[in-house]
Structure formats: C-alpha cells, structure tokens
Image (spheres, grey):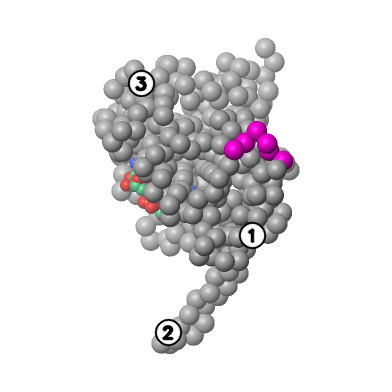
C-alpha cells in the first residue's frame, strides 16, 4: 500500500488542550495508518503561557509558519490571568480570518450510552450539524469606546454582514443538508435586528431556489433555543451567524450530554489555506492537570480532519469506535458519569479500532 503523508501543525494550547491533543493524535495515527495515510506533525507551543512569557500568543510570523501545512489541529487556549479576548483575538480569530475559514462546522449526536440531560431524548435520535458563519457578523473589530471613566462612557460595536459572506455560508449549509436528511433551519432575529438579519433572511430565501431537494425554514433565535431543548430530534442542519452559531452549538452540545464530546472544524472550503480542527470546549482550568478530561471532542475533531483531507473511511471508523466504546462498555470520563482517565478512554478507543 502506498502511503499518503500530510503535514499538520499542532497547537495543544492551554489546560486540557495539552491532555486531549495527544490522545486525539494517537487515535488519528492508528486509524489513518490502516488506510495508508500518515501525518508528519510540527508542534507549536503557542498559548497563554507563551503570552505571559513573551507578551504575544504567537510570534509575529506565526500565520506564515502555519500557512504551508495541510491542516491545523488545536487543543484549546485560555488561562486564568489572561483575559479571554486576548487569547481569542491573539490566536484563534487571526487564524480563522487569515486562512478564510468561513465555515465553522459543529456536528452534534446523542450517542448510545450517553444520557442526555433532557428527559425523553434517546440515543440516535439527535443527529444535527450547526453551520456557523466564522469570519464576519457580530464578531467584528469595527467599533470603539469613548469617554472612558466618565459617566457618559460608551461602547459601540458594528455587526458586519456582506452579500458574499452570507451567500457562501448559506450555500455551504444548503449543500450539506442535501447530503443529509435534506432539512435546513436558518437562525434569525429579523423582528428585532432590523437591518442585518432581514438581509440575511433575503439571501437565504434567494439561495433556497437553487436547492429544490432541501426543505428549509427560519426561526428566531430565541424560539430556536427553546425548540432545541424541547425537540432536538427535529433538526438536521442549522445555519447561523457568528454569534448565533456559537451559542447554538454550545447549547446543542450540552443537549447531547457533555460539551467535552463536541468537535468542530474551521473550514476554508476552497482549500486555498489550511483548515483548523479543534474541540468545541475550552481549556477547562477547573479540571486541567488531573488527566480526566474527556478526549472525545478532540478525537472526533481529528476524524473531521481526516474527512476534510479526503479520507472518509478512517474518519467514520474513528467515530464508530468511540460510539462502540460508549455503547458497549462503562469506560467513560467523569463528565459522562464514569471514572476513566483520559488515557484509559483513549486506550479503549484504540483497542476498538
Ligand atoms: P470550558 O469549555 O473550558 O469549560 C466549561 C465546563 O465544561 C468546565 O466545567 C469544564 O470542566 C467542562 N469541560 C470542558 N471540556 C471538557 C472535557 N473535555 N472533559 C470534561 N469536562 C470538560 O469553558 P470555560 O470554562 O468557559 O472556559 C475556560 C477557558 O477556555 C477560558 O479561558 C476560555 O476563554 C477558554 N475557551 C477556549 C476555547 C477555544 O480554545 N476554542 C473555547 C471556549 C473557551
Ligand atoms: Mg463557543
């Protein structure tokens, strides 16, 4: 068998990022190897620790160092003592924007053996994907603060919605729905936000005409949150702006049992730049260093990376191995009610593979 080799950049980051990243890479290598796929890895120690030592989350040429890789795998960044906007805007957001990773894909499944906190939600019933716009919208640098320290102190932040930006994320979501159960829900709030979200709604309706095989609807974000809790099984693909997608994906992950199992992909679909794969969760300082972090979110993110690189079979095998361990054994980390360590769970997945 000939071997296809990819070069990936690895940024374990802070806290449990340091624990779940090696676990995920071990599973990735084991699954890939059997299909003639291998990885060479370059590890970067960019993190809040770097920031505290050197005053920056990554070096000035950090983006250029990442540029030549086939993909980027990230653990999590964030540490007590470093403001969260520093860690986010010093690393994650520059990577997402410089590499035009405008799709943030966040699949959610309720696995057999993982009880949802919602009474009445059974395994296999919930299988949805949140497609979050990842480069514009509410997360904009446009705005500012005035009159700091005075009684009339103020802050203004502009949300930016562009026709190309909305069109490409909506097209991605319609296309994805077409490969799944053919249902798309658009998150909006065009009753309250009267410029940007009616614009979003118009583009969704325009683009829908190109996807006759997909049925779609739109929901205001508040009602949509309620429906995700009351009846998560009805959803297939949900598309939302940067802020709405962020909130919905944490909500949906919690419905599925634990934020520790949720994966994500930051995709540049044109493949002009590397895409980035990372668990949805953060650095979890409350449990960091104890070796009990749930590695599923990171492992599943590694599977998404394999799929993006063109290897859906080993990717599916990874997800099925995780599902099998959860369904047939008691091995699981404390967030899922078990007592296994990160490495015990990882070993169980490896032996299943
Ligand atoms: P968090 O996701 O780190 O933790 C929230 C809760 O979930 C904690 O109780 C934690 O113990 C638990 N948890 C998270 N992942 C887990 C896992 N794999 N296994 C078991 N339990 C898990 O979110 P939080 O506490 O809001 O943020 C902590 C730090 O992480 C902050 O500095 C924040 O800015 C950063 N963060 C970074 C992200 C990233 O790198 N993409 C995303 C979210 C937060
Ligand atoms: Mg979030």
> Can you say which quadrant of the picture contains the N terminus?
top right
Q: Are the two marked residues, 3 and 2, in contact with CB atoms closer than 8 angstroms?
A: no
* Mark sitting on residue 199: 1
Of circles 3 and 1, the one toward us is: 1
Is 259 in the magenta? no
Q: What separation in Å lies between label 3 and label 2 (alpha carbons)? A: 56 Å
Is 66 left or right of 114, judged from the image as shown?
A: right
Q: Where is residue 96 in the image (x, y as percent from the top left)?
A: 61, 51
Quarter of the figure with residue 113: top left
Is 212 in the magenta? yes
Report the magenta stretch's main SS: loop
**Residue 265 makes an appearance in the image:** no
**Circle 2: element type:** loop
Q: Are the two marked residues, 2 and 1, in contact with CB atoms closer than 8 angstroms?
A: no
Query: Which circle's residue, 3 or 1, is located before the other in the chain?
Result: 1
> Residue at left 60%, top 66%?
195
**Segment colored magenta:** 210-215
Disc 1 under 8 Å from ligand 2? The reply is no
Q: Mark 2 points at which residue?
A: 149
**Circle 1: element type:** helix
Is 245 left or right of 62, judged from the image as shown?
A: left
Q: Name the residue under label 3.
A: 327
């Amino acid at each position: 068998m000939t071997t296809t080799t990819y070069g990936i950049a690895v940024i374990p980051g802070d806290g449990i990022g340091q624990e779940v990243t090696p676990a995920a890479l071990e599973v990735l290598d084991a699954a890939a190897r059997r299909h003639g796929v291998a990885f060479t890895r370059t590890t970067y120690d960019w993190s809040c620790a770097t920031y505290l030592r050197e005053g920056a989350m990554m070096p000035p040429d950090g983006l250029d160092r990442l540029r030549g890789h086939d993909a980027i795998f990230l653990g999590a960044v964030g540490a007590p003592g470093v403001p969260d906007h520093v860690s986010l805007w010093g690393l994650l957001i520059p990577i997402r924007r410089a590499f035009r990773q405008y799709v943030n894909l966040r699949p959610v499944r309720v696995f057999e053996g993982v009880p949802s906190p919602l009474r009445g939600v059974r395994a296999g019933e919930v299988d949805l994907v949140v497609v979050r716009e990842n480069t514009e919208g509410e997360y904009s640098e446009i705005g500012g603060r005035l009159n700091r320290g005075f009684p009339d102190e103020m802050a203004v932040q502009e949300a930016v919605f562009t026709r190309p930006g909305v069109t490409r994320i909506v097209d991605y979501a319609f296309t994805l729905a077409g490969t799944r159960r053919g249902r798309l829900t658009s998150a909006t709030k065009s009753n309250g936000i009267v410029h940007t979200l009616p614009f979003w709604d118009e583009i969704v309706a325009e683009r829908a005409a190109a996807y006759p095989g997909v049925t779609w609807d739109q929901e205001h974000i508040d009602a949509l949150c309620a429906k995700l809790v009351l009846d998560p099984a009805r959803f297939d693909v949900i598309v939302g702006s940067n802020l709405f997608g962020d909130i919905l994906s944490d909500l949906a992950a919690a419905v599925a049992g634990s934020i520790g199992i949720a994966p994500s992909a930051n995709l540049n679909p044109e493949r002009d730049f590397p895409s980035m794969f990372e668990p949805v969760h953060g650095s979890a300082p409350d449990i960091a260093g104890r070796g009990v972090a749930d590695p599923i979110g990171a492992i599943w993110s590694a599977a998404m990376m394999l799929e993006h690189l063109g290897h859906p079979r080993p990717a599916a095998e990874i997800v099925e191995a995780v599902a099998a361990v959860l369904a047939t054994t008691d091995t699981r980390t404390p967030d899922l009610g078990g007592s296994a360590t990160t490495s015990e769970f990882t070993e169980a997945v490896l032996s299943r593979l």
